[in-house]
Image (tube, rainbow, N blue to C red):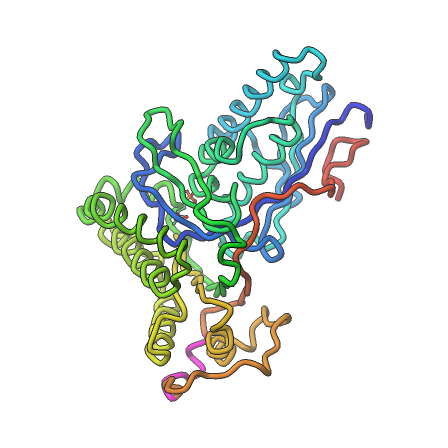
């Protein structure tokens, strides 16, 4: 079969919002009720690798995710494939010599380099990698912003994973979503010293999925109206400016306030939605005590629709931020690449408050940093003889 299998591979990153997307004005198109901002995280630590292949011999569209087959028959995935095929058809119509890839079924093989069970937003990296790999296979001329519109239909936050560095998702106003897309606020090179420590929090209960959580908030929270009309529009401008000025104090304060605001509208939903647990709350306290001891904001926490803490900080403060985290979570996995001898506890930190109980509930630490957008790769996950996953 080898002559007949066309293929291309891409990797895509995870992004963690500093100004949260929460609320849809159109559920089918994933159109948001507010604009949002995120930092793209390094693919060295967290990424999805996807190979897209197509052949006239494939009998149906099929996806394998981390080794097991998954249905592509979901409305969201179908919308993404339809859009990509439509663009490919346009190309084929303009150049007769091109093979009719748009008419062939796809075999997609996708792998994460981090455990899905960690509860990290893997759907963003997943849809961004899917769209990037198929766009590469189809040799589409569309820009990253154009492709972000397609990824958005798969999972809202996925649109922001089409860029590296610092990214905004502009909510847009068109009913068809044609202006609801991601744009880059600043490149990785503009502010390369942004670091992120992820505290993976173990959680027994199943979180409310983001789509149903958002719907409940939109329908029942009074506070939500204030958030989307008053709070976020101002914060969106302020946060973009803080990124452009590399002003960590403002960036950090806005990040923490927006995480608080997002979890407040969850609590204000009826019945209430709780994503933070006691471990998450201890992480918040820890960051507050650290900033108090430093006399300025050196670390900023944020939480998505789950209990994991993501703590942003700058390289210049690594010694004191990681010093504290290592004191508490040093026994956990995740410190392999850190020279712990260089770390220290900041003067004035109330160490007497810290006991064994502070590390409970956290299962591992992921130390990472701002990173690139989707990358092309020569790695191929599809066996070109059989059209099936290699492993
Ligand atoms: O894209 P979704 O449906 O997984 O929603 C993501 C929502 C948050 O992670 C809580 C916020 C965000 O902007 O990423």
Can residue 277 be seen by looking at this rendering? yes
- Where's the C terminus, which quadrant? top right
Give x and y (percent) for residue 192: 53, 59
Looking at the image, is 325 positioned above or below residue 97? below
Tell me where the magenta segment starts and ends, as one range: 352-359
Main SS, magenta region, reads helix
- Where's the N terminus, which quadrant? top right
Image label count: 0
Report the residue at 45% width, 82% height from top: 356
Report the residue at 32% width, 59% height from top: 254
Looking at the image, is 374 positioned above or below residue 56? below
* Residue 358 is a magenta residue: yes
Report the residue at 31% width, 30% height from top: 173
Looking at the image, the residue that sits furthest to the left is: 222
Quadrant in the rendering for residue 291: bottom left
Of 208 and 374, the residue lying toward us: 374
Can residue 270 be seen by looking at this rendering? no
Of 369 and 359, the residue lying toward us: 369
Of 355 and 367, the residue lying toward us: 367
Give x and y (percent) for residue 299: 41, 69
Give x and y (percent) for residue 371: 55, 54
* Residue 131 is a magenta residue: no
Looking at the image, the residue that sits furthest to the front is: 245
Give x and y (percent) for residue 162: 52, 41
Report the residue at 60% width, 53% height from top: 43
Image side of residue 5 versus residue 151, left or right: right
């Amino acid at each position: 079969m080898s002559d007949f299998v066309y293929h291309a591979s891409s990797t895509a990153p995870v992004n963690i919002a500093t100004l949260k997307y929460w609320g849809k004005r159109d559920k089918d198109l994933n159109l948001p009720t507010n604009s949002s901002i995120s930092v793209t995280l390094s693919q060295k630590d967290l990424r999805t690798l996807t190979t897209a292949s197509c052949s006239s011999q494939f009998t149906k569209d099929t996806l394998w995710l981390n080794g097991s087959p998954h249905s592509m028959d979901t409305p969201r995935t179908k919308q993404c494939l339809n859009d990509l095929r439509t663009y490919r058809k346009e190309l084929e119509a303009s150049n007769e010599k091109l093979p009719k890839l748009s008419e062939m079924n796809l075999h997609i093989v996708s792998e994460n380099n981090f455990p899905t069970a960690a509860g990290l937003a893997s759907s963003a990296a997943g849809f961004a990698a899917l769209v990037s790999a198929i766009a590469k296979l189809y040799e589409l001329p569309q820009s990253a912003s154009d492709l972000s519109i397609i990824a958005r239909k798969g999972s809202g936050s996925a649109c922001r994973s089409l860029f590296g560095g610092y990214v905004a998702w502009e909510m847009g106003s068109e009913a068809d979503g044609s202006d609801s897309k991601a744009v880059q606020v600043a490149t990785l090179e503009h502010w390369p010293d942004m670091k992120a420590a992820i505290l993976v929090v173990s959680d027994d209960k199943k979180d409310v999925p983001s789509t149903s959580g958002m719907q409940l908030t939109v329908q029942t929270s009074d506070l939500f109206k204030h958030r989307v009309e008053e709070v976020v529009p101002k914060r969106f401008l302020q946060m973009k400016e803080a990124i452009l000025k590399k002003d960590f104090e403002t960036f950090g304060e806005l990040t923490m306030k927006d995480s608080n605001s997002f979890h407040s509208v969850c609590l204000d939903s009826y019945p209430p939605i709780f994503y933070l647990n006691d471990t998450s709350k201890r992480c918040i306290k820890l960051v507050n005590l650290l900033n108090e001891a430093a006399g300025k904001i050196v670390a900023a926490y944020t939480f998505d629709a789950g209990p994991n803490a993501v703590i942003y900080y700058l390289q210049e403060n690594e010694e004191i931020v990681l010093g504290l985290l290592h004191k508490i979570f040093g026994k956990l996995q995740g410190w392999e690449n850190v020279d712990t001898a260089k770390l220290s506890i900041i003067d004035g930190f109330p160490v007497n408050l810290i006991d064994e109980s502070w590390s409970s509930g956290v299962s591992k630490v992921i130390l990472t940093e701002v990173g690139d957008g989707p990358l092309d790769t020569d790695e191929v996950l599809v066996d070109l003889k059989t059209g099936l996953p290699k492993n």
